[in-house]
Amino acid sequence: MSVGELADRVGITPANLAVLKNGRAKAVRFATLAALCDVLGCQPGDLLRWEAEDAAGD
């Protein structure tokens, strides 16, 4: 599936999907996460991972 098709099926712009894909998002709406999981047939944990902030960057 192309990025454009995924964005259309989820209901977000390709630019916003790229922000999510590249890890630059500061937040994600639960509705967007739910739509991604529905379209991709996955669970939120398949898309998200926890990364601790760098202590020096605080």
Image (cartoon, grey):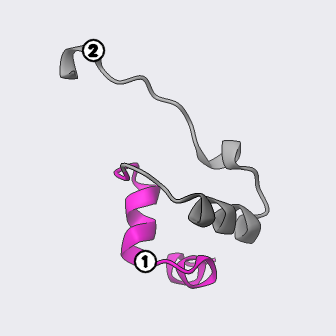
Classify 7 as above or below 27.
Answer: below
User: Is-magenta flag for residue 45?
Assistant: no
Q: Quadrant of the C terminus?
A: top left
Distance between the alpha carbons at the discs numbered 1 and 2: 33 Å
Bounds of the magenta span?
1-25
Can you give x and y, in whole percent of width and height, for residue 46 in the image?
A: 69, 46
Residue receiving disc 1 = 14
What SS does tag 2 mark? helix
Which residue of the protein is positioned furthest toward the left in this rendering? 57
Which residue of the protein is positioned furthest toward the front in this rendering? 30
Q: Quadrant of the N terminus?
A: bottom right
Classify 32 as above or below 23.
Answer: below
Total marks in image: 2
Magenta stretch, overall SS: helix
Can you give x and y, in whole percent of width and height, for residue 55 in the image?
A: 27, 14
**Callouts 1 and 2 close, C-beta under 8 Å:** no
Name the amino acid, label 1: Pro
Residue sitting at x 56%, y 36%: 49
Residue sitting at x 60%, y 58%: 30
Residue receiving disc 2 = 55
